[in-house]
Amino acid sequence: MARNEEFVEEELLDEELEEEAPAGEGFFDSLSSQFGSAPWWVISGAFHALLLLLLTLIGMAIYRAQTNDVVITTDLEKSKPPEYDEKKPRDVFKNPVPIDSDMPPVENPVVTHEEVEIADHVETENDMDMATAKGDEAAISDVPLGGVGTVAAIGLGGGGGGAFGHRLGGGRRRLATRGGGGRATESAVDAALKWLAEHQEADGHWDAMKYGSSQKTDSACTGLALLAFLGAGHTEKVGKYKDNVRRAVGWLISKQQANGLVFDSTDAGGHRGVGYPHSICGMALAEASGMGRVPETKAAAQKAIDYTCNVHQQGDGSDKGAWRYSAKSEPDTSVTGWFIMQLKSAKVAGLGVDAASFEGAIKWLDAVEHKVEGGGGEYGPASVYWYQKTNPHEHTQHRLTAIGTLGRQFLGWKKEDLEGSVRWFMNKGGVPKWDGGGSVDLYFWYYGTLCVFQQGGDMWKQWNDSMKSALCDNQRKGGDEDGSWDPVGAYANEWGRVGQTALCCLCLEVYYRYLPLYKQ
């Protein structure tokens, strides 16, 4: 009986439910009936929340699909390197030395004599990792004084020709193009340094006789080769060839004698004595000191300068004269030119130089200077320099006058007072021309290039065009001698391929080796 009562109660409950839920209503109908009386903003908020959730899920699915891309790598067949083309100019600009620097770029107008490419990136001012590599820019400024001397001109002003310039990378490239060089000259410099680096002896020196010299002149040749590396901005600390520079400096220091003389005692002294090699080696040490700032190098350079001023130079105190092959002997203009350049580099490097030594050089140039009316053509009178006071040495007067005029430039003379002399030695000696050896004169070309560059103008355009053609067109290409120059012409038998290559390289570095003395 109890079970029947439970059954009846369940049937009554089902009937009540059926009455509350009309026939035909589903889930959404039921949901509508439940929320139909809710406010409209509640329904709208719920709908938009659901839509936002769906969009978020779709976006995440697309992102996962993109980040799961498969990257497939394959080995590419190595291409055969192009065959060597000896007629194709070497391109050093495609392989710049990467140097970090926060120095601003140099903003100078570019004046070119040949087409150059414009870089698509900004290079540092001198592409060095230390600002001191370019030397003391306050050492020589635009020369405001005529005939007063280097004691007044060197050490005053800012940014002048005595500074070691912007010798590497961006600065080197800008100055090359601005001064009339370019891709061909820089390619030739790069190739020359490569040859010198590959033919340096393990102890740091260069063997002159191994490469064509008729006598052992290793001291002078090592000094010239070192100057070529320094001229392109390589020091004991920075640059592609810093190891070559470090070893060359070390060898020169190892040959320095107790009194400061830098000379390998096994070299052939001959009638050249020790004057030429010491003046060249001392200049190289001075520039290395100013650029690398290595204490040992600075000490050796100062010792060499002290020898120059106190031991080798003729005279003493205020009565000093100039220099020649051996200490205290009667001077000549040729050797004196190298010593003037040495002391100039020493002053720029911040080394101590006796002011009386510069005064002695000035007195010597005064003693061997001879005026030639109309000798400079349209530029008026010319000063021609003799070999010694009573010896004009007429067959080499073009070289001597180039040396004397360059000395005057770095000793403080005005540009306009020297133009006649520059025109005179250009007319007498001619512009550089490589004709197989007969007219090749690297001694004259070296001093002439430095001197005419400082004068600038049309004379520099004439000289530079001929110099570039003579050197760039006759540099050896291919084989073991690639990048060098054949030792032909005046004095080449004394320095061989090493000295010839170093001097040619120094000529082609003229655009940035020393900044201009005069405002152009």
Image (cartoon, rainbow, N blue to C red):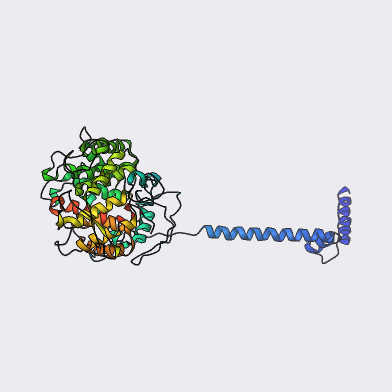
Q: Write down the quadrant of residue 505 in the picture.
A: bottom left
* For residue 465, above or below residue 368: below
Which of the pair 272/86 is nearer the observer?
272
**Residue 516 falls in image quadrant:** bottom left
Q: Nearer the viewer, residue 32 or 349?
A: 349
Find residue 416 and report its horizontal and vertical position in percent.
33, 58
Q: Can residue 413 be seen in the rendering of this structure? A: yes
Total count of labels: 0
Residue in the image at 20% along x and 49% along y:
333
Q: Is residue 480 visible?
A: no
Judge from the rendering whether residue 120 lies leftward or rightward of residue 499; answer left or right. right
Relative depth, front residue between 276 and 249: 276
Q: Quadrant of the C terminus?
A: bottom left
Residue farthest toward the front in the current orientation of the protein:
373
Residue 454: x and y, percent? 32, 56
In the figure, 297 relative to 12: above or below?
Answer: above
Say left or right for 461 vs 199.
right
Q: Residue 3 appears at what percent x and percent y? A: 86, 49
Residue that appears at 19% across and 54% down: 500
Where's residue 361, x and y in %? 26, 45
